[in-house]
Amino acid sequence: MSRLTDSFRNIFKIEELKDRILFTIFCLMAVRLGSHITLPGVDFNALDKQSASSNSLFGLYDLFVGGAFKNAAIFGLGIMPYISSSIIIQLLGAVVPYFQKLQKEGEDGRKKITQLTRLGTVLVSIGQASGMAVYLSKQTGVVAAGVNPFFFTFSTVICLTAGCMLMMWIGEQITERGIGNGISLIIFIGIVARFPNAILTEVQMVATNQHNIIVELVLWAFFVAIVTFVVLMTQGIRKIPVQYAKRVIGRKVYGGVTQHIPMRINTAGVMPIIFAQSILFIPTTVAQFFPNTGFGDFLNSFFSYRSMGYSIVFAVMIVFFTYFYTAIAFNPRDVADTMKKQGGFIPGVRPGKHTSDYIDNILTHITLPGAIFLAIVAILPAFVSYLGVTSDFAQFFGGTSLLIMVGVALDTLQQVESHLTMRNYEGLMKQGKIKGRVGVGGY
């Protein structure tokens, strides 16, 4: 314990690291502040707090923006338009030659892709802001009396789009001048902001004898075990040895070393759950437009997140999207070509197509346990809710919330660890190393 305390003290001994952490905290506080500033023309007192149900597409969206959507705030779109634009560009890079060419042009190509991503963010923001303006207009009493409908729609689109671009800029500033991945941290802080309320609700239920204290302690032990399991699976890798031939250039000898390719068990990250959840929440969102009808009741019952049919379909879709997104995010052919150009080879495997097939075979095998792991984690909140756990607390037992929290925390700790070890300070962990990961969906 004393070693851990000394490590935290060392953080503030490094002036640059201290400034980065304080800058990051300041930026995240600004993000949370913007999540509570209501849009012009909206009557906050009449705003229906239950309008964004947790079992709908709106509820999923509100989860990532930290309640800003439900508050009808200027940061109501969150950073999601930027994520959507980035995913679209990434998918285009797998099928469109122009984007494939940009990905191979180095720094110039990266800058061009960044510009296109920002332009796409503006377009997506305008579309989503228009939809949110219509959504708010249909809520009884939300738009203040006497507000012109055209003015409300126009001002809402401008404010939400500007808010999204401001959050994108804040995220980029955190990445450049702060600590951790800025975009991921913005999503992270929005999810973590719900955690204190979830804990308070559980404490109140124990205090009022609605929950047994022994059962509550068992649930917390189960929660810790799940978090530990998610951390282990997130860090799990399969190492493929790669040997580089010796090359003599002038009087120097290069190569002759053995390295490895780290193949993650969970290469796709949290994206398969987001894809599957987005699709499965569409029916319940459509059901809201058909209230008190047989069709609407059927959609609500079958696609309820607590139904067995929903859990089975959800798990199957996650396995499918895990393989789909892994195939897009990791191209064995590109890896094999790069190794061949650099004089590297896998012992016992011929360079070129044989290497590509070998890597692809390993990737296919390790993706299966990763996909099953994601499916189990995704459906855990539904099963935990049967034990009487409130919906606010149940969402932290798995799903996107837990995966994002663990992934971003590991990545941020890894960067802090790098600053400490680079200056010969004791790290945060006993071994002195933390295997981090990229941000949400690689952003």
Image (spheres, rainbow, N blue to C red):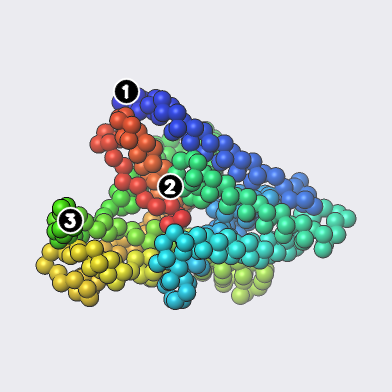
User: Where in the figure is residue 339, as x and y percent of width and height?
Assistant: 24, 65
User: Where in the figure is residue 376, as x and y percent of width and height?
Assistant: 36, 58
Circle 3 crowding by C-alpha within 10 Å: few under 14, some 14–19, many from 20? few
Q: Which residue is mark 3?
A: 250
Are the residues tagged 2 and 1 within 8 Å (C-beta)? no
Q: In the picture shown, does residue 184 fall above or below 206?
A: below
Circle 1 crowding by C-alpha within 10 Å: few under 14, some 14–19, many from 20? few
Q: Residue at x 70, y 45 (%)?
A: 37
Task: Out of 291 and 20, give the one closest to the viewer.
Answer: 20
- Under mark 3, the amino acid is Gly
Q: Residue at x 11, y 67 (%)?
A: 348
Q: In the picture shown, does residue 4 fall above or below 23?
A: above
Lateral position of residue 440 relative to residue 37, left or right? left
Q: Tell me, yes or no, if residue 436 can be seen here.
A: yes
Lateral position of residue 360 relative to residue 86, left or right? left
Which callout, 2 or 1, points at the residue further toward the start of the chain? 1
**How much space separates mark 2 and mark 1, taking CA atoms?**
26 Å
Q: Quadrant of the N terminus?
A: top left
Circle 2 crowding by C-alpha within 10 Å: few under 14, some 14–19, many from 20? many
- Under mark 1, the amino acid is Ser
Q: Which mark is residue 2?
A: 1
- Under mark 2, the amino acid is Val
Q: How many marks?
A: 3
- For marks 3 and 1, give the one nearer the viewer: 3
Task: Out of 386 and 28, give the one closest to the viewer.
Answer: 28
The quadrant in which residue 265 appears is: bottom left
